[in-house]
């Protein structure tokens, strides 16, 4: 995806989330990953521990990277939490490149599940 298109689509996703939640500020990537993780978990809790929040973001990243075969869904544990198996290393190095990859996958997620 070209950089200008990535920037445009990323902003579109952020505005979609901001509007859906009726917030004043645009969400950052961590907030969007947290929301995707909650969606993939499939149920809401009134509160999440710090560890559970990190786990939800991890679930989101694994789900997003499963689009390109980096992870594979293994199943759910007794509490209903999804688990993924790493299939291959992500060859992207550097924070900016990793961020761009996650933005592309989040955009794909929104195109597949929201728009």
Image (cartoon, helix red, strand yellow):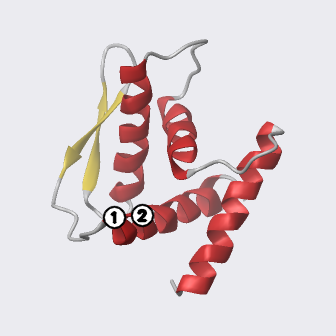
Query: Is 106 placed left or right of 85 in the picture?
Result: right
Tell me where residue 107 sits by quadrant.
bottom right
Residue at the image position 53 percent from the left and 32 percent from the top: 38
- Judge the density around disc 1: few (<14), some (14-19), many (≥20) Cα neighbours within 10 Å: few
User: Quick one: quadrant of the C terminus?
Assistant: bottom right
Nearer-the-camera pick, 25 or 32? 25
Identity of the residue furthest to the left in this view? 88
- Judge the density around disc 2: few (<14), some (14-19), many (≥20) Cα neighbours within 10 Å: few
Residue at the image position 37 percent from the left and 14 percent from the top: 79
Image position, residue 39 (x, y; %): 56, 36
Tell me where residue 52 sits by quadrant.
top left
Residue at the image position 56 percent from the left and 22 percent from the top: 43
At mark 1, the secondary structure is: helix
Label drawn at residue 99: 2
At mark 2, the secondary structure is: helix
Above or below — where is 42 with respect to 36?
above
Whether residues under marks 1 and 2 lie with C-beta atoms below 8 angstroms apart, the answer is yes
- CA separation in Å, label 1 and label 2: 6 Å
Residue at the image position 53 percent from the left and 51 percent from the top: 29
Image position, residue 33 (x, y; %): 50, 45
Image position, residue 35 (x, y; %): 57, 38
Query: Is 109 placed left or right of 85 in the picture?
Result: right
Label drawn at residue 22: none
Query: Is 11 placed left or right of 22 in the picture?
Result: left
Image position, residue 44 (x, y; %): 59, 20
Nearer-the-camera pick, 70 or 97? 97
Label drawn at residue 95: 1
Q: How many dots with numbers? A: 2
Q: Of discs 1 and 2, which sits in the foreground? A: 1
């Amino acid at each position: 995806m070209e950089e200008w298109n990535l920037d445009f689509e990323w902003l579109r996703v952020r505005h979609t989330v901001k509007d859906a939640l009726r917030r004043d500020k645009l969400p950052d990537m961590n907030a969007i990953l947290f929301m995707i993780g909650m969606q993939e978990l499939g149920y809401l809790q009134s509160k999440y521990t710090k560890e559970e929040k990190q786990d939800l973001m991890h679930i989101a990243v694994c789900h997003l990277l499963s689009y390109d075969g980096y992870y594979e869904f293994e199943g759910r544990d007794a509490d209903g939490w999804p688990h993924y198996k790493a299939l291959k290393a992500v060859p992207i190095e550097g924070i900016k490149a990793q961020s761009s990859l996650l933005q592309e996958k989040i955009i794909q997620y929104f195109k597949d599940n929201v728009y």
